[in-house]
Image (tube, rainbow, N blue to C red):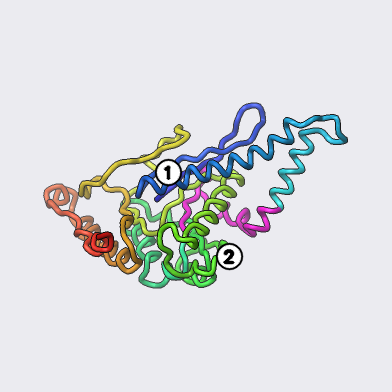
Amino acid sequence: MGMVGSPRKQTGGGGGSHSASFLLGALLPTLLLFRLASDRVGERLASISTYTLGNNNGSSSAHEQMMTHDANLTDTEERVFPGLAELLPRVATDDGTVIITSVNEAWSRPGSLLDLFRAGFNSGEGIAHLLNHTLIVAVDPGALAHCEAVHPHCYLLEVTSANVSSANRFMTRSYLELVWAKLELQQRVLQLGYSYLFTDVDIMWLRNPFRHISLYADMAVSTDRLHGEMDRVCTMHANCCIGLENKVHDLTNMAADWKNYTSLAPPERRDSGRTWTAPAQCEESMS
């Protein structure tokens, strides 16, 4: 699952934001998360509107009240996300875009998904430089330690759930708490004026997905399905797969297939007829 968001300035001096959802994995979970995030933003906007639509016959104007509200909100968010505002300028591209992924201790161990995620950039076509613009969000201290051992841009996101250090099953309480924490961080990134692409760490990047995202759409959703074309594949997502070990096993096979393919000269690639190894363990996990 991947989501793209960017800050948006509106005429008339009002501030706002829009998010574009770029679907690299399962459609329903992404749309559900996008809808919930929009609902929460709507609640925020509704609270602000009480200032702008209220009477101005008090000691302060509606504008002053809203500015005070925004200042208090910023102070609160700084406490929730300490150091984020200082870190983002070091990660962002020249146009202010940040790639964001998140890991827990289980997913960031040596030989686990974080290593496969980073290896995809290094073996992909012309995307190794994008690692320098990737912020890896650790949801527990163990994940932060693993991240800092291999990556220059790591950020610890405090999550109160007692079970975020292990792999969480879809729609469990710990899973949902983690989802909300990540959505709140993404909202803060937008408020700080940056665009972002959020990508799950069990997605292997092979080519640049930014080339497929419209710069002018408020929301973009990809429903493309891969039919095995190695000359066209952009990312590979280990969704529809239960169990960390199964994800690692089948993504490792994908990485080996890609390495064999890219070792060929361009004419040989077209004529090789190579295909991907079937994700046998992931398929079995869903049966």
Residue 3: % across, % down: 44, 46
Q: Is residue 248 above or below residue 267?
A: below
**Mark 1 nearby-residue class (10 Å; few <14, some 14–19, many ≥20):** some
Q: Are marks 1 and 2 in contact (CB under 8 Å)?
A: no
Identity of the residue drawn at 60% across and 30% down: 10
- Decide: few, some or many residues near mark 2? Use Cα within 10 Å; few <14, some 14-19, many ≥20: few
Q: Residue at x 27, y 48 (%)?
A: 233
Label 2 belongs to which residue?
A: 160
**Is 221 covered by the magenta stretch?**
no
- Name which residue lies at 42% across and 43% down: 31
Q: Nearer the viewer, residue 237 or 169?
A: 169
Q: From this viewpoint, which residue is outermost toward the top?
A: 12
Between marks 1 and 2, how big is the CA–CA gap? 25 Å
- Residue type marked 1: Leu
Tell me where residue 73 appears, x and y as whole percent: 70, 48
Q: Where is residue 99? Give x, y as percent.
A: 47, 51
The answer to whether 63 appears left or right of 84 in the picture is: right
Residues rendered magenta in the picture: 76-102
Q: Nearer the viewer, residue 9 or 41?
A: 41
Q: Position of residue 230 (x, y in %)?
A: 22, 50
Which residue is the site of mark 1? 31
SS state under label 1: helix
How many discs mark residues in the rendered view?
A: 2
